[in-house]
Structures are given as structure tokens and as C-alpha cells.
Amino acid sequence: MLHTELVPAADKNSRRLMIMLHGLGDSLEGWRWLPPTLELPWLNYLLVNAPDEYFGGWSWFNFPGEIAPGIHRSRRLLFELLDELRAQGFPADQITLCGFSQGCLMAIETGLHYPHRLAGIVGISGWVFELDALLAGLTPVARSQRLLITHGRFDPLLPLAETEAQVRRLQAAGLAVEWREFPKEHSVHGLEEVALIREFVRAGYAVVGS
């Protein structure tokens, strides 16, 4: 069971939801600035802590070291969270899954394996886990998912070229991936990147309606 905190929409009847996954060593507190900054009054937010303690914060999987077991465990926990949210009245196609760094990897990994279409997947300054296996096992649902992946040209932790090469392979496989790079390091590029995310999120709900 993951520890979560719901930030409700100003529109109390809205079932639109954005799930926020933090990076290594951070916590759900690291995303508390986003809801007022995005200025989408019809959007609920679910801030989520990763399952493993990490030097005062939390982690989705071991890093460095053998990352696969933790990723598979965290993906299962996020599947359970999505299923629970659907049972609570948040339809899958009204949920946007967003993550930064480790959270980016988990958003892509979870979103492209989940058996229901989401409103969108946003990955910021991260990478893709086991890309060959992912592409080999793509489902029709995965091919219908919308993705926005962003990265920094000056990222000292995760080189731009490696993530961009992964994104180009996802695009070549027919996935609907929007790729944007920013003059940033391992961070969110201020209001410019926030504006891009806002428009991507808006477009996802315009497509699914209600």
C-alpha cells in the first residue's frame, strides 16, 4: 500500500485526476507546488510517496544496483493504486500519470503496461526501463496511450542523448510520444515547462470528454 494524499479540485464534482510520482530521495511534498501552479480548477491531484525509505526521502527502486525487482514491485503497487482509484469512481481515461526522474520511469513503465487507457502519461527528466522488452510486448492499449516526455539539455545525471534515443524508438514503434527538450539540468524548467504540461493535460481531457 502506497502512502498518498489527495488534493481535491475546486470543482467538487470532477473525477479528473493527476497522479504525481516524485524522484529519488524526494517525497510527495516535492510536488505540493504543482496544483496551484498548473491552475486547472477541474483537476484533482494525488501525491504519492514511493515505497522505500531513502536517506530521509523515498525511492521507487534501488539505485544504483539491481533495479528490476524494485521496478516490478512498484509497478504492481501502482497498478493496485490505479485499480483502487477506478473502484472509487475515477475512470482510467480520466487519470493522468506524471513523474520526475525515477518517477518518470515508473510513470512510463506503469502507463504502458496498464491494461486500461489513461488520459495521458507525463515523464520529466527520466528514462525507459528495458526498452527492448517493452517494445516486444506492446499491447493495443499501449499504442493508444498519449505520452509527453521532457528532458534537459544539460542534465548531469541522465544524459539527454540516451533518453532521446529511447524516445525516438518509442515513436518509431508507433507510440504517440511528444518529445520536448529544455535548457535545464535535472529539474523542471519553470513556467515554460509547466505551460507545456498544462496544455498536454488539457488536451487529454478534451479528447476523452466529460
Image: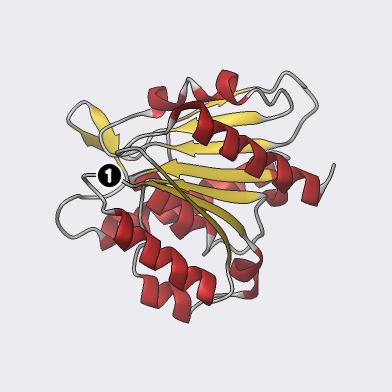
For label 1, the SS is loop
Residue lying at the far bottom of the rendered structure: 136
Q: Where is residue 200? Give x, y as percent.
A: 64, 44
- Left or right relative to 137: residue 59: left
Taking the image as shown, residue 119 lies to the left or right of residue 77, namely right
Q: Nearer the viewer, residue 173 or 115?
A: 173
Q: Position of residue 165 (x, y in %)?
A: 37, 67
Q: Nearer the viewer, residue 188 or 206?
A: 188
Q: Position of residue 183 (x, y in %)?
A: 37, 40
Compared with 146, 5 (above or below) is above
Q: Quadrant of the C terminus?
A: top right
Q: Position of residue 122 (x, y in %)?
A: 52, 47
Q: Which residue is mark 1?
A: 155
- Amino acid type for the residue under numbered disc 1: Asp
Q: Which residue reaches farthest front?
A: 183
Q: Residue at x 57, y 39 (%)?
A: 197
Q: Is residue 134 above or below residue 127?
A: below
Residue at 55% x, 45% y is 97
Placement of the N terminus among the 4 image quadrants: top left
- Number of residue marks: 1
| Quadrant position of residue 55 | top left
- What residue appears at the point 35 percent right and 37 percent down from the top-left corner? 184
Q: Residue at x 71, y 22 (%)?
A: 41
Mark 1 surroundings: few (<14), some (14-19) or many (≥20) residues within 10 A: some
